Image (cartoon, rainbow, N blue to C red):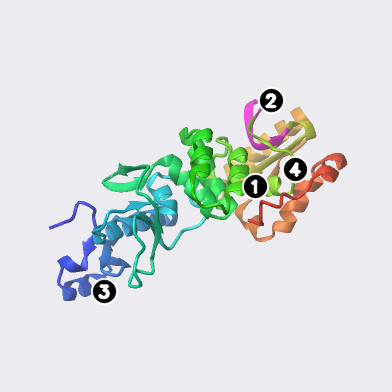
Amino acid sequence: MERADGLVLAAEHHPNLLRSRVRRGELERLRRGAYLPTDTIAADRHVAARVRAVARIRAVHARLDAPHVFSHTSAALLWDLPLWEPDPRVHVVQGYRAGGSAADDVARHRAVLDRWVELDGLPVTDLVRTVADCLLALHPLHGLVILDAALRQGVDRRSVRDAVLAQRRRNGKARAQVLIELGDAGAESAWETWLRYVALRLGLPRPVTQFPIATRSGTYRSDLAWPRDRVLAEFDGRVKYTADGLGAGWDPDRYRFDEKRRDDVIAETLGVRPLRFVAADARTLAAVESRLLAAFPTSTRRAARRNPLLPPP
């Protein structure tokens, strides 16, 4: 009999049957005692990673008898918020301190079980509390990625600030409040947030997101813009440059042609071309910073001061 959550639990099946199905490639082990049918895992590696992560959360839920609420990055996943990088642990809030036999892939947080809702049958911290927890606990870039996405979903910035201030912990509150001010619903991807974070860390002025540019060919939007300094910056996902990258029939050469034509028209209108960045640029942060700074007038560069609350991404 199949479970509603799609999992295959060792406690409900003979071990020989499980071993056989794993050998045939029908099951994939998620964690001790829990498996996922491989035909439920998407071909796209990013989608597959999220499917596995959510299934792992469900597997932990199936094993926990005591009251619990999923939190932090686990809650972010369940709220369909992006993560900058996968978290190998499942985060739960419980009202007691776990003993030494606790599973090493579960991070338990002792707190009052308040501010939670049920999502698809799972107890989860509400959206505001989830964002606040992530801002306090994660690297600032990782927290900002989650905040930007939550703001796009309509979360109230003031409510997040109140939730941060209501936390008992003191560490991280100052940084979290800075991030709350820097959050921007205009970021349409985690990589756009990364590019903005790099600029803000340098102490450059806060950019305008999705800046409209009216040209003779229509209105285009730039991911980031500093209108006063006449600087534009774009992040290009690698998928756009690969065959079928955005679905069957996607033509990367056509995209490159359209991209160049777009940049030509923007340059004709504003007198500047957008700076373009890709994911591989993250490996050479100094080069990204140099390119950004070089695009600005001397007066802006001289006024820029690195933000001490924003460490390297």
SS class, disc 4: loop
Q: Which residues are magenta?
A: 212-226
Residue with the mark numbered 4: 204
Residue at 36% over, 44% down: 114
Q: Could one spot residue 202 in this view of the protein?
A: yes
Residue at 39% over, 42% down: 126
Residue at 64% over, 39% down: 259
**Residue 197's mark?**
1
- Left or right: residue 169 versus residue 36 is right
10 Å neighbourhood of mark 3: few (<14), some, or many (≥20)?
Answer: few
- Left or right: residue 1 versus residue 151 is left
* Residue 22 falls within the magenta-colored stretch: no
Distance from Cα at disc 3 to Cα at disc 1? 45 Å
In the rendered image, which quarter is residue 102 located in? bottom left
- Disc with the residue nearer the chain's start (3 vs 4): 3
In the rendered image, which quarter is residue 67 located in? bottom left
What amino acid is found at the position of numbered circle 4 in the picture? Answer: Leu
**Residue 23's mark?**
3
10 Å neighbourhood of mark 1: few (<14), some, or many (≥20)?
Answer: many
Relative depth, front residue between 137 and 54: 137
Residue with the mark numbered 2: 215
Q: Position of residue 204 (x, y in %)?
A: 75, 43
